[in-house]
């Protein structure tokens, strides 16, 4: 640049600044969804872009611009709608419906008893069986859910954490009964217990034994189910519980780094298990902040894995992630508006380079989604993919002053949190001290106050409300209480019909492995084949390992 | 005359782990000068009623987002009654379809708050309702 040009640029910037300062602005809060101040304009003075160091190219270190060289020209993201409700049979029908609509992967939602490791006939499960997902208490239930679905062809994501190793064992045993070897299976178990203590709150046992089960699962899968994604390190629930974008990113990556530490400490080679770790993020309404978050996630992880853990394989450095649009952004008021919110969030996920995506249905603040609402949600993704032409160019916002400044800022926030977590002694001590829980709660309360004070606008809720506040006319999807009764009968029949000696022997083997150091996964698969139930297995684990006591944070 | 302090138990019955709403409301009620006890997660109806009786609270507020409200809300009410706490002001919130809200209100829950409710409105409502009840007690 010549000297004259430089002077001109500086002058132009000064002139704009003066014009801006003397102009009258709207009465509004110019902050991000996370409550951070935003400048009116971003330019070369606001961010230094080192394209080689900080951006790289799609498919190359540090992967800021994406994990594949071709991005969506090679393959579109997987459209994966999370589903599951009522009985295994009904869920099986929904899965076949979704596969028929062109969905390319399955994603299983479990009910609360299953998520907490209780059988459908446990007293504590009353009223909850099949409500928010499918009830799976045994191998038999898994077989019903997967009936007629080619398990060697579909990839299945199971959102389960505390009991993840046991549900994976049911899945493996189910495939083996269909004549399919474990090595052919593809899919994911969420299996991210750390965020359960922090945000989602479906735990089985205390953190240390839970982490041991996770390293058992990682080690088992690297040997027997090499195409399985062993942990889906999840920010989604952290965000939904109220965190900011930066907190979501920081806590998720901190958890991920903790799993890597544990795997290495258990004697595994980082390059053996790190490629099977994947991520799961929320996509909320602040379009640019979300895109920056996805980009920062890739860059931070790549750098940490290479520098801190000495990972050599490219696959170990890559953040591959699933995204779900933000359930918390949906409103019960004027629910059709939720289609528009979901579209914006889905677009951010795509521009951020997601590998798979779930779009929420407009009626989810009222009940489980109806078939019609699910179809619109899936069609939203298909419109983005097929009609908007956005999928042709990798990282289309890369190099934008604003996006790069946001990406850098989120990275700085994350590093500050990593330092603080380290000061607290690491992720587990920070959980026990309630650190994450308090941080998330504080952000949730701040956001609620911002909405109530009108600092943040929510259409249909605190602005543009309908005169007629009567409930929206939307069909409600209800779970038949007969599901619970049927489940009890099925389980009673299963227990009466099985080889009891074999079942008890399998349970004794689980206890022995839990008390000792043998890999628990082998015992879980054997127990699944012996028709032991989820609740029978977790009762042993709770007994041997002890339960988690929620720290007081309020 | 001394202002009587409203004692509230915020409870999370069932296996549902969604505590964002319950904790936010608990914080707001506390900021409003109420005495608030939060049960923590995964409570049975018996556990909630037991704490309510021990602490002799005026209000029990329940939060459920798991769809189990028609099972658990009535059970909490029954457990409270069996402990001589039938006079407690019962309120609730969560993902609850309109028909269920009506049924629960007919079954003894004074007020249900759905998604999008303002915490300030919840606090005002409890405040007004408790003071109305105490004023009526004073008249008798």
Image: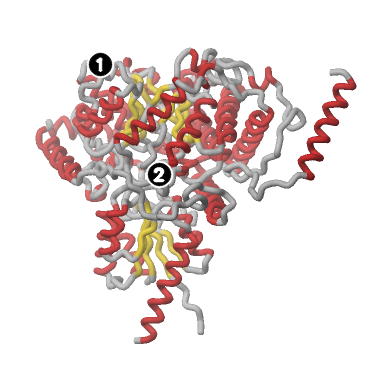
Would you name the residue on which mark 2 appears? A335
User: A224 and B29: which one is in front?
Assistant: B29
Q: Could you tell me residue B41's position as x and y percent?
A: 38, 52
Which residue is rendered at x = 53% and y = 33% of the image? A253
Name the chain letter of the residue that bears numbered label 1: A
Left or right placement of residue A22 versus residue A198 in this view:
right
User: A372 and A6: which one is in front?
Assistant: A372
For disc 1, the neighbor class at 10 Å (few under 14, some 14 to 19, many from 20) is: some
User: A212 and A381: which one is in front?
Assistant: A381
* Residue A161 numbered mark, or none: none
Instruction: Determine whether the residue tagged by mark 1 lies in a helix, strand or loop.
Output: loop
Establish if B136 lies above or below A179.
Answer: below
Q: Quadrant of residue A46?
A: top right
Left or right placement of residue A529 versus residue A415 in this view:
left
For disc 2, the neighbor class at 10 Å (few under 14, some 14 to 19, many from 20) is: many
Establish if A489 lies above or below B35.
Answer: above
In which quadrant of the rendered image does the C terminus of chain B lie?
bottom left
Q: Earlier in the sequence, mark 1 or mark 2?
A: 1
Q: Could you tell me residue A173's position as x and y percent?
A: 24, 24
Residue at the farthest right position:
A3
Which residue is rendered at x = 41% and y = 24% of the image? A382
Instruction: Residue A298: tell me if it is visible.
Output: yes
User: A368 and A168: which one is in front?
Assistant: A368
Would you name the residue on which mark 1 appears? A180
Which residue is rendered at x = 59% and y = 31% of the image? A292
Which residue is rendered at x = 36% and y = 45% of the image? A546
């Amino acid at each position: 640049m010549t000297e004259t040009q430089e002077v001109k640029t500086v002058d132009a910037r000064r002139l704009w600044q003066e014009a801006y300062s003397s102009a009258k602005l709207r009465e509004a809060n110019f902050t991000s969804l996370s409550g951070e101040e935003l400048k009116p304009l971003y330019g070369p003075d606001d961010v230094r872009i080192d394209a080689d160091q900080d951006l790289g190219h799609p498919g190359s270190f540090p992967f800021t611009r994406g994990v594949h060289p071709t991005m969506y020209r090679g393959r579109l993201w997987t459209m994966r709608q999370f589903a599951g409700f009522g009985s295994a049979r009904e869920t099986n029908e929904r899965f076949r419906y979704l596969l028929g609509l062109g969905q390319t992967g399955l994603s299983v939602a479990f009910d609360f008893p299953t998520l907490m490791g209780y059988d459908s006939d446990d007293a504590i499960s009353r009223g909850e069986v099949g409500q928010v997902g499918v009830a799976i208490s045994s191998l038999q239930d898994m077989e019903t859910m997967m009936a007629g679905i080619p398990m060697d062809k579909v990839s299945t994501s199971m959102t389960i954490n505390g009991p993840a190793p046991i549900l994976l064992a049911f899945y493996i045993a189910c495939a083996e009964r269909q004549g399919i070897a474990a090595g052919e299976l593809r899919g994911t178990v969420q299996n991210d217990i750390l965020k359960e203590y922090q945000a989602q709150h479906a735990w089985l046992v205390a953190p240390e034994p839970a982490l041991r089960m996770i390293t058992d699962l990682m080690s088992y899968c690297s040997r027997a189910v090499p195409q399985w994604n062993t942990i889906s390190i999840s920010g989604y629930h952290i965000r939904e519980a109220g965190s900011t974008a930066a907190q979501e990113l920081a806590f998720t990556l901190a958890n991920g780094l903790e799993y890597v530490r544990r795997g290495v400490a258990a004697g595994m080679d980082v390059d053996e298990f790190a490629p099977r770790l994947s991520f799961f993020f929320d996509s909320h309404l602040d379009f640019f902040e979300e895109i920056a978050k996805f980009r920062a996630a890739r860059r931070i992880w790549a750098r940490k894995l290479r520098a801190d853990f000495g990972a050599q394989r490219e696959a170990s450095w890559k953040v591959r992630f699933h995204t779900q649009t933000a359930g918390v952004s949906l409103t019960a008021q004027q629910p059709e508006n939720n289609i528009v919110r979901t579209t914006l969030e889905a677009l951010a996920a795509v521009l951020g380079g997601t590998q798979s995506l779930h779009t929420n249905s407009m009626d989810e603040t009222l009940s489980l989604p109806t078939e019609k609402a699910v179809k619109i949600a899936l069609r939203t993704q298909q419109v983005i993919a097929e009609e908007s032409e956005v999928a042709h160019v990798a990282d289309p916002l890369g190099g934008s002053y604003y996006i790069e400044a946001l990406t850098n800022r989120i990275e700085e926030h994350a590093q500050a949190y990593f330092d603080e977590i380290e000061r607290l002694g690491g992720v587990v001590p920070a959980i026990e001290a309630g650190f994450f829980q308090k941080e998330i709660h504080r952000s949730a309360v701040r956001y609620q106050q911002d909405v109530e004070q009108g600092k943040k606008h929510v259409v249909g809720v605190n602005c543009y409300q309908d005169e007629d506040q009567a409930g929206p006319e939307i069909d409600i999807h209800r779970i038949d209480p007969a599901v619970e009764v049927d489940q009890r009968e099925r389980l009673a029949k299963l227990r009466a019909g099985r080889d009891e000696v074999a079942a008890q022997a399998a349970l004794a083997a689980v206890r022995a492995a839990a008390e000792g150091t043998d890999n628990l996964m082998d015992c879980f698969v054997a127990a699944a084949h012996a028709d032991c139930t989820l609740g029978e297995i977790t009762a042993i684990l709770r007994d041997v390992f002890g339960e988690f006591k929620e720290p007081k944070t309020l | 005359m001394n202002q009587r302090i409203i004692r509230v138990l915020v409870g999370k019955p069932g296996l549902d782990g969604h505590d964002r709403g319950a904790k936010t409301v608990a914080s707001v009620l506390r900021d409003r000068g109420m005495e608030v006890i939060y049960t923590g997660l995964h409570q049975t109806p018996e556990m909630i009623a037991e704490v309510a009786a021990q602490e002799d609270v005026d209000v029990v507020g329940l939060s459920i987002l798991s769809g189990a409200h028609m099972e658990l809300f009535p059970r909490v009410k029954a457990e409270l009654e069996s402990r001589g706490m039938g006079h407690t002001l019962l309120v609730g919130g969560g993902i609850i379809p309109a028909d269920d809200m009506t049924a629960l209100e007919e079954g003894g829950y004074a007020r249900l708050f759905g998604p999008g409710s303002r915490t300030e409105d919840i606090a005002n409502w409890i405040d007004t309702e408790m003071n109305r009840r105490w004023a009526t007690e004073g008249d008798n």
